Amino acid sequence: MRWVLAIAMTSISVFPWSSAAADSGDPVRLGILMGLNHSSRNGDLADMQWVNGFAGGLSLRVNQPRRPWVEFQMLYSRKGSAWTEGGLDSDLRLTYLEFPILFGLPLRITDSLFFEPRAGFAPARKVDEELTIDGSSFSSHYFNDWDVGVIFGASVRRELARVGLSFEIRYTIGLIDIDNPDETDFRGSDRNRSVSFLAGAAF
């Protein structure tokens, strides 16, 4: 029994839960996020390619001493994909206003450095859709106005005085078919997916 307690105490000393003091004593923190989306679709075409787009927005984190935190975000997010069909090159860009809700587990590496695995879900409202085929742009409505995805990721956070700096990598996979049934016959497997790289600052 003693060696079990020794291992437990060692684990707690190496990876203790963060407290409100580690987060500068703030139970609620506002932040900004900015970075890159690397996105594509799980579609019927075998050669679906990945494209890059901007992602950025605001966050509000609710901290609990010695417990996981919850964070609410609002992000402007550019997604899309590229493919070739019938000898024609096509490029799709979908712009969303996303509302991720994330739950994270703060693991302390040093007094000011934290590793934070996280997971959540993200409802999204489409605000723009642009389809380019063989160099010609079209204002289309082939895709649904709403999407929702699940998020898995991790971040590293560094506390500097009253500012927390972070770098996050997250993977988002869509849960629903994004094709508009009124505009296209391709349905059932067309879902967004993206890898996001986000830098942030919380105050």
Image (cartoon, rainbow, N blue to C red):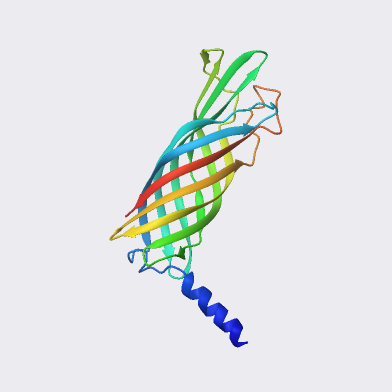
Q: Quadrant of the N terminus?
A: bottom right
Residue 136, position in %: x, y? 52, 12
Q: Quadrant of the C terminus?
A: bottom left
Tell me: residue 5, above or below residue 189.
Answer: below
Residue 38, position in %: x, y? 52, 35
Residue at image point 55% right, 24% down: 92
Quadrant of the image occupied by residue 2: bottom right
Residue at image point 45% right, 51% down: 72
Residue placed farthest to the left in the image?
161
Residue 16, position in %: x, y? 47, 71
Residue at image point 52% right, 39% down: 124
Tag count: 0
Tell me: residue 188, above or below residue 184.
Answer: below
Residue 19, position in %: x, y? 41, 69
Q: Nearer the viewer, residue 181 or 66?
A: 66
